[in-house]
Amino acid sequence: MERCRILFSGSGGQGVITAAIILAESAVLYEGLNAVQSQSYGPEARGGASRSDVIISDTDIRFPKVIQPNVLVCLTQEAYNKFSELIRPGGLLLTDNHYVTQEKKVDARHVGLDMYKKVMDKIGKPIVFNICMLGALIELTQLIKPESIMKVLDIRIPAPFLDLNKKALELGQKLVENFER
Amino acid sequence: MERCRILFSGSGGQGVITAAIILAESAVLYEGLNAVQSQSYGPEARGGASRSDVIISDTDIRFPKVIQPNVLVCLTQEAYNKFSELIRPGGLLLTDNHYVTQEKKVDARHVGLDMYKKVMDKIGKPIVFNICMLGALIELTQLIKPESIMKVLDIRIPAPFLDLNKKALELGQKLVENFER
């Protein structure tokens, strides 16, 4: 496989760290891959855009930070403004239409989705917005099988919330099922 | 301040990643410091000892992995066997007496505590074991103020579990209040 460098960005409460951890764990535990997941916080973390990095590879990963992501997810306008220029040429830029208005041209495939809106319409709980995003991401990239994510949800998510999370994952997948991969 | 490199290790369900994230966030959000938090998973992650790294500093942090920790926390025997030799000479090695038997000599201060036993006796919920450990750690190292951790718990922990977590933090602090720092 080609090494995949993913940068999730958004604001504090949107669950980007959790999404990153779930993705990394599913790669390692159920797909036999290596993964590194990290977040760095500097002065900009106080009130600014938060980011979380994941690298997934079938070979050793030496440097754990993402410099130029193949896949960039921006869940707020601030995150988009700050990180969109980092994207690797030809990469995938995934944004949410409720939070982000595309303003710049980047040399990447830009997919804007109604993830937040769909989650609110169909499930009504903003807390699973991050898992819906993960569903869209794995469907667009074909990076990790949904079953592998489901297995990590089984371990990580408390029982009362498990169904909501699985629904959100499927909702994200369905949002992009007719998209080109 | 001296840069602090902390390595948390244990098994999957013990909450070492969550503890690491809470510590890093409290440093950044409420103490004006910089922090990096990461986990790398390789083949050893499948069924082996899991680790999570935090670096806290008042200056920029360029390389996010911990090579030689000042503070090493081992919550299982396997984690202790695997990581204890990494400790920086003169560092602090914190272990739990229920899970870990000291077998080797390391050039560090070794503090073995009855954290798991106390959590089960006083609170009865193993899920807050990680927060009790964090209480002991901040009290021994004086790295972060307990109020800063409390504020992060307020944000991160769902309301029904908040009291349990705050109790566990205080329990950990009390366990070491008569120890030399």
Image: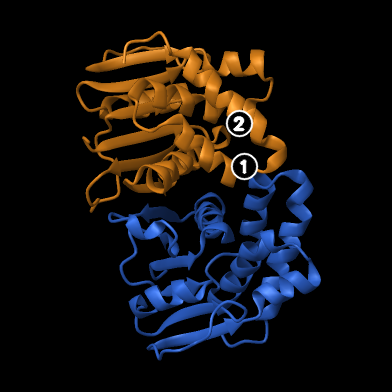
Chain colours: A orange, B blue
Mark 2 belongs to chain: A
x and y, in percent, of residue A121 in the image: 65, 13
Left or right: residue B177 compared with residue B43 = right
Quarter of the rendering containing residue B81: bottom left
Q: Is residue A61 above or below residue A153?
A: below
- Write the residue at 56% across / 18% down: A116
**Mark 1 residue type:** Ile
Q: Is residue B155 above or below residue B124?
A: above
x and y, in percent, of residue A107 in the image: 22, 17
- Write the residue at 43% across / 32% down: A9
Q: Kindly identify which residue carries mark 2.
A: A165
Q: Is residue B14 above or below residue B87?
A: above
Location of the N terminus of chain A (image quadrant): top left
Left or right: residue B96 compared with residue B59 = right
**Mark 2 residue type:** Asn
Residue A157: image tag: 1
